[in-house]
């Protein structure tokens, strides 16, 4: 009997169908963010440096992608090393406009033609994000909530342009294109007026989200604080939760955007009482919202376990959001994607019905005992089988592929 068959028998004793878990884990899409490949630089044609808007990729590891072709080349390398169904997640600053400088309020779907062609050739769908940062009109720290109506109008036009682009991507590729709206707006130190920016933000979102675009699904993303907005964030969790519920938009939960003692695991069962779906960004904060590479951590496992125990894995749109410029970027991608897929598989192997039954019968000691036993079940053998069936490297063997790619491709980038 193989190691996998032994593991399969162990899980069967818990009433868990391993074959079904593997099949389902491979089918759930993970949206892979493009900005790990180039450290959130983008391809805009502009003069001079621009404020990062509270986003900073630290490190100077060689091999950063310098253009769209290199990002897509890196995507191809990554997709060959990770199992399962995937999507690609783009930011507006990844438009390819040649040598022309195109305003963010003027970008259109044709500026993403290469991305659409690539996605078609790979049989994957695209998601999209407006870029409300790293721009002269974001230098004050405010965009959609800015006090100047002309600056607000610019960012509203940008948001509308992005929603139209998403609709075009959807038409070209089929299925929905999820558009996630995150803004850096806020104050570095004590602010006297927290009311006016939030009122303006409501009005701005109402205007830019009023029109319906086929295939475009909008989400809004909160944050506890950011670089340059340590004291006050206009788009707080309470703000966006209320906005999403009242306007029937998706709420995005980013694992790094809450207080260090908070996890999102407890939030999903509350939010999904009132919303059909949730957008989940897997990330890893370390002391602050630092977007470290995702690991197969207790927080990650807990989030997906909650979704499984609420029969809600199909109600979560899963995307990655981390960037580390201090390590090989292909390795960063593969570690984070594999960790997220592991957490999905781990959740699908959860003996949910048994645990629910024991808790319902008041057998809480037995429930805890089984939860503890579950932690040492032969999960690794099931994960290896999943990778083998997906025809991607098993175990640590992908590291050699990463090193070969670094030698043959990344080392040639200055």
Image (cartoon, rainbow, N blue to C red):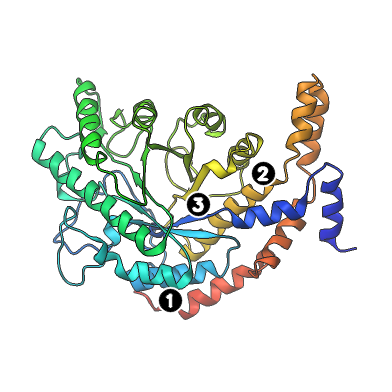
Report whether residue 201 is seen.
yes
Is 188 on the left or on the right of 221, as rendered? left
Q: Indicate which disc, 3 or 2, sits on the residue closer to the N terminus.
A: 3
Find disc 1 in the rendering and name its residue.
411
User: Closer to the observer: label 3 or label 1?
Assistant: 3
Q: Give the residue number, with chain letter if any, for mark 2.
A: 347
Secondary structure at badge 3 equals: loop
Q: Quadrant of the C terminus?
A: bottom left
For image coordinates 70% across by 67% down, the residue present is 388
Q: Is residue 377 left or right of residue 48?
A: right
Compared to residue 55, the image places residue 331 above or below, namely: below
Mark 2 and mark 3 in contact (Cβ < 8 Å)?
A: no
How far separated are the C-alphas under marks 1 and 2?
Answer: 38 Å
Mark 3 to mark 1: distance in Å? 22 Å
336 over 1 or under it: above or below: above
Residue occupied by mark 3: 293
């Amino acid at each position: 009997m193989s190691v996998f068959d032994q593991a399969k028998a162990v899980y069967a004793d818990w009433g868990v169908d391993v074959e079904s878990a593997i099949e389902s884990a491979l089918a759930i899409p993970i949206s892979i963010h493009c900005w790990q490949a180039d450290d959130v630089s983008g391809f805009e044609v502009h003069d001079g440096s621009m404020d990062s808007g509270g986003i900073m990729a630290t490190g100077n590891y060689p091999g950063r992608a310098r253009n769209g072709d290199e990002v897509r080349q890196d995507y191809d390398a990554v997709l060959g090393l990770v199992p399962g169904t995937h999507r690609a997640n783009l930011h507006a600053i990844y438009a390819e406009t040649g040598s022309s400088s195109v305003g963010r309020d003027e970008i259109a779907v044709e500026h993403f033609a290469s991305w659409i062609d690539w996605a078609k050739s790979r049989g994957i769908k695209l998601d999209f994000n407006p870029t409300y940062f790293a721009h002269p009109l974001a230098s004050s720290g405010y965009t959609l909530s800015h006090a100047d109506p002309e600056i607000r109008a610019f960012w509203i036009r940008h948001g509308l342009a992005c929603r139209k682009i998403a609709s075009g991507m959807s038409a070209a590729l089929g299925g929905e294109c999820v558009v996630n709206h995150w803004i850096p707006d806020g104050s570095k130190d004590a602010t006297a007026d927290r009311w006016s920016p939030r009122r303006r933000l409501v009005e701005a979102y109402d205007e830019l989200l009023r029109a319906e675009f086929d295939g475009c699904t909008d989400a809004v993303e909160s944050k506890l604080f950011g670089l340059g907005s340590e004291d006050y964030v206009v788009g707080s969790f309470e703000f966006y939760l209320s906005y999403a519920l009242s306007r029937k938009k998706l709420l995005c939960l980013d694992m790094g955007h809450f207080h260090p003692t908070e996890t999102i695991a407890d939030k999903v069962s509350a939010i999904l009482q009132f919303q059909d779906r949730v957008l989940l960004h897997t990330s890893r904060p370390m002391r602050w919202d630092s977007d470290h590479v995702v690991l197969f951590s207790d927080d990650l496992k807990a989030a997906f376990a909650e979704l499984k125990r609420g029969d809600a894995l199909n109600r979560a749109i899963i995307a990655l959001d981390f960037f580390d410029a201090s390590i090989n970027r292909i390795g960063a991608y593969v570690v984070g994607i594999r960790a997220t897929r592991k957490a999905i598989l781990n959740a699908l192997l959860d003996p949910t019905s048994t645990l629910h039954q024991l808790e319902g019968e008041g057998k809480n000691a037995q429930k805890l005992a089984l939860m503890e036993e579950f932690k040492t079940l032969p999960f690794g053998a099931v994960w290896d089988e999943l990778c083998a069936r997906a025809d991607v490297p098993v175990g640590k063997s992908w590291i050699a592929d990463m090193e070969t790619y670094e030698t043959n491709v990344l080392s040639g980038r200055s």
